[in-house]
Image: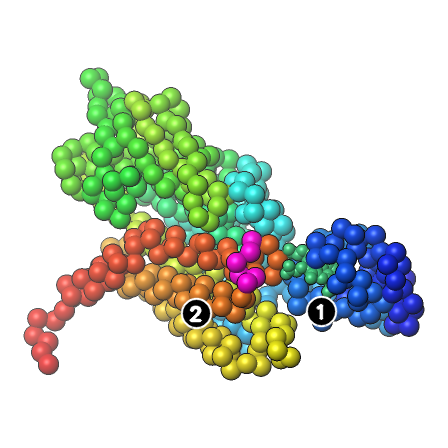
Amino acid sequence: MRAFTREEVARHSAPGNALVIIDQNVYDVSKFAAAHPGGDRFLLELAGQDATRTFYQLHRKEVLAKLGPGLLVGTLDGSDPAGEVEPLLSSVPFAEAMWSRDGHASPYYNESHRRFQRAIRAFLRDIQPEADRSETDGRVPTPELFRKLGDFGLLASRIGVLGVRHLPRGVALPGGVRPDEFDDFHELIAHEEMGTLGTPAFTNGLGGGMVIGLPPVLAFGRPELAQRVAEDVLSGRRQIALAVSEPFAGSDVAAIRTTATRTADGRHYVLHGVKKWITNGTFAHYFVTAVRTGGDGMRGISLLLVERGEGLSTEQIKVMYGSAAGTALVTLDGVRVPVENLLGEEHAGFRCIMYNFNHERWLMNASMLRGSRAMLEECFKWAHQRETFGDKLTDKPVIRAKLARMAAVVESAHAWLEALTFQMTRMTHDEQVLHLAGPIALHKLFTTRTATMVADEAAQIFGGRALTQTGMGRYCERFWRSVKFGAILGGSEEIMADLGIKQALRQFPARARL
Ligand code: HEM
């Protein structure tokens, strides 16, 4: 790599002979200027000069990672030619949870959690370009990528302790964590790390159906069925979705209308109905499906594992965060399902559906909150490099006040999440239902209100750039389009608020008086 002095660079300041310095690197933009998306004029005005400050007002550094190598001709004399290596964990304020920041301690995490986090972070960094591409063009994750995640042990980690018990043959956990070391905090980290990709639809595409669909199979399926499906799904060879919601029944699960009637020989169920908003439905092989086998209400519901086949068709639903999650309308038209695929008891499916609700909400909170934290980091970086009216945005009290409000709610929500997770490590499943269903529901309400506020403030900080799908504000624009998913799916904010307080009232001491 050639070394340039600043004086030498200054001699290349004309169209057709134009060098610019960015971050101590020297780029030849003579030919590129004509193709520059921002036009040639602004670019050539800085020919022969150090354009670093101006560059970062207008471009994310990914622009250089993508186009820079083709334009790079040297470095500034005396600079480090290797350039800056992006650290695995960010040191931007509030960008990482407190436990993983240098010099901070936590009672909840040990060295295995740190290893686990770093291994996943490094793994996900490699797939970031693919995630960004798919988020933009709406392509669902490839079968190869699912297998990669399976082989890395990340799919099993996202099902938690239950998933690790079904670790596929030959698969180890990220960071060399032993299965007997694995706890709910490892699982928390796995969900949070997925949120660092900043690609809500694609991330949901990569197992959003699995984290809610597989647990009922493992908990209530016959052992041979559970084993087969776990091996298929956790190795990334096949995908699974949870098919509960219907056009007439979202949060009101007891109102579902899809029917399953037994054949005369009693060996099969025959299904008719429609399921809506089914995450990963366009490409799933397995559908954990809620059906009506009995009378009205929750006591007439059963849960069946349905395999894609005759009578089952899926159609893409276009949703606001894009198509990479494979959200589908699933039509069941005379689908035959062997009775061995019943999960739990007949007519007792409501309990099986409820079984994973707290876990589902908790993991949604983990990844949504990580999204809010990532947005906070974006805002800090942007406000630190963006100049308006002659000052950096961080020099303006009104912007600092916004950052303060965002940081306060994100840190509070995270501290509550860790406190809930710690309780999970100490309680049986039944104890969690009794003591944590309400608090987790309230935490979900707080998390989605936090995300809504963060999305709103972030957009104000990014200004017009928050409105475009490319450029500096692209993650902000995406985040905006994802917050309503968390606020509505998995139990709407209204239902979460009501559930949280109703559960608290059930435990209200009879003699408590003012
Ligand atoms: C190696 C140097 C450069 C490369 C590879 C480059 C590349 C790009 C790319 C890919 C975009 C589209 C941004 C996006 O949508 O993500 C862009 C936009 C732009 N660039 Fe550059 N650029 C370079 C240097 C510069 C410099 C030195 C200036 C000086 C003013 C400049 C001014 C602009 C402007 C004004 C835009 C439009 C930004 C917007 O719409 O917000 N570029 N550039």
x, y percent for residue 220: 29, 40
Residue identified by numbered label 1: 54
Q: Distance between the residues labelled 2 and 1?
A: 31 Å
Secondary structure of the residue carrying tag 1 is helix
- Quadrant of the image occupied by residue 21: bottom right
Dominant secondary structure, magenta: helix
Residue identified by numbered label 2: 410
Ligand 1 quadrant? bottom right
Please say whether residue 339 is visible from this viewpoint: no
* 435 is within the stretch colored magenta: no
x, y percent for residue 415: 40, 71
Q: What residue type is labelled 2?
A: Val
Q: What residue type is labelled 1?
A: Thr
Secondary structure of the residue carrying tag 2 is helix
Residue at x-position 32% and y-position 36%: 275
Image quadrant holding the N terminus, namely: bottom right
| Residue at the front extreme, as displayed | 41
Residue at x-position 79% and y-position 55%: 33
Mark 1 CB within 8 Å of ligand 1: yes
- Quadrant of the image occupied by residue 249: top left
x, y percent for residue 264: 20, 17
Please say whether residue 446 is visible from this viewpoint: yes
Disc 1: CA contacts within 10 A as few (<14), some (14-19) or many (>=20)? some
Q: Considering only vertical position in the picture, is 273 above or below 428?
A: above
In the shown orientation, is residue 374 left or right of residue 5? Answer: left
